[in-house]
Each structure stands twice: as structure tokens, then as C-alpha cells.
Image (spheres, grey):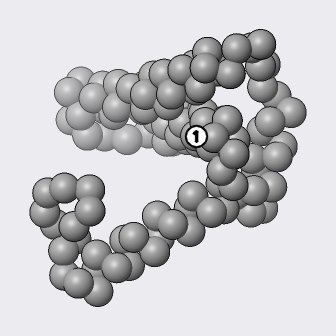
Amino acid sequence: MTFDEYQKQALTTAIFNPDPLMDKTIWAMGIVGEAGEVIEKWKKIVAYRDGNITDEDVLEIKKELGDVVWYIAMMAHSLNLSLDDVMQLNLDKLASRKTRGVQKGHGDNR
């Protein structure tokens, strides 16, 4: 499955508001909220179980990561962006940083 294929299928599960700004706001908040759920699950593994990861933990994190991706797909769509294009741009940016030896550092445009 390509990212665009995922995005197209994910769109069939979305509920849209009449106000496009509200949709974009919900999608943006959803990305952060679901990412928070990922880190919350990780915190419990580290803080309460000394880093012992169970198969159930992996499954629960997998579900939350899927939710993050869903919201990213919705946000990209709301901005008329192809998820394939977003992912390719990210890979190109990271490859450029590697080539230039600036993988570590500060700033978005290093």
C-alpha cells in the first residue's frame, strides 16, 4: 500500500465539518493528542516496568501510531497535499542533511 492509497482509504472514515478551518484545527490537535498517547504508553513502560516491553505494549503503541498517521493523512488532505509527496519531501530533506553532515543540530533548515 502506498501512502496515497492509505490516505484515500482513511478519508472514507473521516467526518468532515462545514468549516474547513475547524477541520484543520481538529486534524492538527489530533496529531498532537495521539502522539501524546504514544508517549504516555512509553512512559508507563519505562517508569513502571523498567523498560520491559510486552507484546501487548507493542500492539497498543502500534494502534496509537496508526492514529497519528490517520490524523497526518487528514491534515495533509485538508491542505491539498498528497501523503506520498509529504513523505518523499521528508526523505529528500533527511538525505540532504545526511549528505551535508548536518543530521544533528538546530533549526529546521539546516
Vertical arrangement, residue 90 with respect to residue 9, above or below: below
In the rendered view, does 110 fall on the left or right side of 63? left
The amino acid marked with disc number 1 is Ile
Vertical arrangement, residue 96 with respect to residue 66, above or below: below
Q: Residue 92, how many percent across, how many down?
A: 46, 74
Q: Is residue 66 visible?
A: no
Query: Which quadrant would residue 20 be assigned to in this image?
Result: top right
Q: Quadrant of the C terminus?
A: bottom left
Residue pictured at 77% horizontal, 19% vertical: 16
Q: Residue 70, how many percent across, how many down?
A: 64, 37
In the rendered view, does 95 fall on the left or right side of 86? left
Q: Residue 61, how many percent across, how many down?
A: 49, 37
Residue placed under numbered mark 1 in the picture: 72
Vertical arrangement, residue 65 with respect to residue 25, above or below: below
Q: Is residue 36 visible?
A: yes
Residue pictured at 34% horizontal, 79% vertical: 96
